[in-house]
Amino acid sequence: MFAGSMVALVTPFENDRAGQGGRLDEKALRRLVDFHVKEGTRVIVPVGTTGESATLTHEEHEKVIRIVVEQAAGRVKVLAGTGSNSTEEAVALTKAAQKTGADGALVITPYYNRPTQEGLVRHYETLASRVAFPMVIYNVPVRTGVNMLPETVARLAGIQAYVGVKEASGSISQVIDLMDRLEGRMAVYSGDDMLTYPILALGGHGTISVSANLVPRKMSDLCDKALTGDLAGALAIHRELVPLHRALGLETNPIPIKTAMEIAGIMGGALRLPLIPMEIANRARLEKVLSALGIPGKGAK
């Protein structure tokens, strides 16, 4: 149902008096959607980790999804972030995304409270029993404190609502184990830009990408080539983008990607506390990488 290059969309904010992220910048958000439609992104994924969902109110969360759905206008699919560390809240957010008109939901494993593997199964079973909606499970242990194991994901593969899993454990061996256990019953997506090419080469169906915020056409071309069997062509793009993927990990996401988009003239780089502007030395390193790729001065206006 979802395939190819999917962007983990940043959320643009206006600067407040202290220079931090203030109100949602609706005009910039609509421009970003048009930018991705033009540049070949297949699916837009708003209000995930990269979209600073943790700092959004519920009202803002739903507003961002609504704006993205309206602006996309059926030209690309919308996979809305709706996860929570509370099962009831995840149900409510997923129902709201469905009502807004999103095509599906990206549901992160419950964070902070660190459920057991059995707790994860019950969380996702409960969600699927309460909301009839296409959903993608999101496993990112570095953010949540819990690793959803391949055998746990496989237990949910018979539930119709779960169409895929975004795998961001950083372990290729775990991805291989996951694919072996799923046997094609769910799509597997890369949640780590550095591992997008190897996951696609192993039979993955796409990526939910941070880098695609800045280089959507290149990420789209990489995925399209890999998915149509041109692994050599996809590998060439992957190698070109490795320095960028590495630079976007210099500080906590989305600090580097928002900084890069500001440098490139795509949008302002305002962040909401507790995230703060990139350190000067790291910004200089990022600027050097962008310059080598010819990125400064390009982007959506």
Image: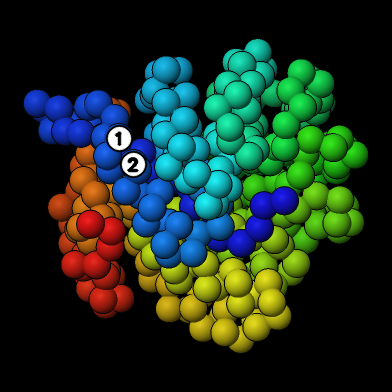
User: Where's the C terminus, which quadrant?
Assistant: bottom left
Q: Position of residue 204 (x, y in %)?
A: 71, 62
The amino acid type found where label 1 is placed reads Glu
Q: Position of residue 72 (x, y in %)?
A: 47, 46
Front-most of 44 and 85? Answer: 44
Front-most of 268 and 287? Answer: 268
Residue 217, image quadrant: bottom left
Label 1 residue SS:
helix
Do callouts 1 and 2 mark residues in contact (Cβ within 8 Å)?
Answer: yes
Q: Which residue is mark 2?
A: 29
For residue 176, above or below residue 106 = below
- Crowd around label 2: few <14 · some 14–19 · many ≥20 (10 Å): many
The amino acid type found where label 2 is placed reads Leu
Front-most of 85 and 184? Answer: 184
Picture residue at 23% right of the left edge, 45% below the top: 269
Q: Position of residue 159 (x, y in %)?
A: 86, 35
Residue furthest to the bottom: 232
Q: Is residue 222 left or right of residue 104?
A: left
Residue 38, image quadrant: bottom left
Q: CA distance from mark 1 to mark 2?
A: 5 Å
Picture residue at 23% right of the left edge, 61% below the top: 264
Picture residue at 15% right of the left edge, 52% below the top: 280
Q: Position of residue 253 (x, y in %)?
A: 39, 45
Q: Which mark is residue 26?
A: 1
Picture residue at 29% right of the left edge, 30% below the top: 24
Q: Which mark is residue 79?
A: none
For residue 156, above or below residue 260 = above
Residue 89, image quadrant: top right
Q: Is residue 13 left or right of residue 129?
A: left
Residue furthest to the front: 73
